Amino acid sequence: MTTFSSCCNRSSSYHQTYFIPRRKSYRIFQKLNYRVLDAIIEDPEHDRPIKGFWKQIMAARLHLTMELLRNGTHLLVTDVDNVFSRYVPLYGFLDEGYDVFHAYEMRYPTYIFDEMGFVVCSGHQFLRSSPGTLRFMELMENRCKGDKCDDQVVYNEVFWRELNVEWDGDG
């Protein structure tokens, strides 16, 4: 399951949080009064492995992120296994003036980590809906045109191979 939080104003830290659960959990989240979006992929048959299923999920997340950004929505995209150790108001991301924030990933994709010393995580990011963010995300979308790709590999490939970002080391 992925959560998308859209934000921001000063009176509250976010306007809406959307959950995108598996189909079996959809009604449960609705009954609990969560904002729930329809599943972005169909549930697989759980008794056999589905080749490319993970890449299908990640491609769908990337394409939904683009759709929401194009609609003018600022996003905090987070996997449900992220742990928040303290409260940080989401409007603070906007106040910083940056368009995109990414968390560090531990080591994946390893071939980029081994070469560059760190990689960014696609499972925890803040994206401001802005012309710069849309241009950046269009690079991602162009690398992930189909219905299967690993968005974390795509992010890191674009950062390190296409944009040649020079990191300032402040972090």
Image (cartoon, rainbow, N blue to C red):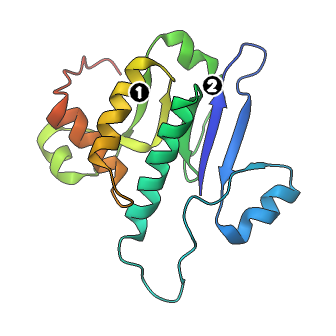
Tell me where residue 107 appears, x and y as whole percent.
28, 49
| Label 2, residues with CA under 10 Å away: few <14, some 14-19, many ≥20 | few
Quadrant location of the N terminus? bottom right
| Residue sitting nearer the eye, 126 or 52 | 52
Q: Is residue 30 above or below residue 143?
A: below
**Residue 160, percent from left and from top:** 18, 35
Which residue is outermost to the left? Answer: 115
**Outermost residue, bottom direction?**
47
What's the residue type where badge 2 is placed? Val
Who's the residue at 59% across and 16% down the image?
92
Residue under pointer 1: 134
Residue at the (65%, 22%) spot, across then down: 89
Residue at 16 percent of width and 51 percent of height: 111
Q: Residue at x 19, y 21 (%)?
A: 166
| Residue that mark 2 sits on | 88
Label 1 sits on what residue type?
Leu
Horizontal side of 89 relative to 153 (left or right) equals right
Q: Quadrant of the C terminus?
A: top left
Task: Left or right? Give the position of 140 relative to 32.
Answer: left
Decide if residue 36 is on the left or right side of residue 57: right
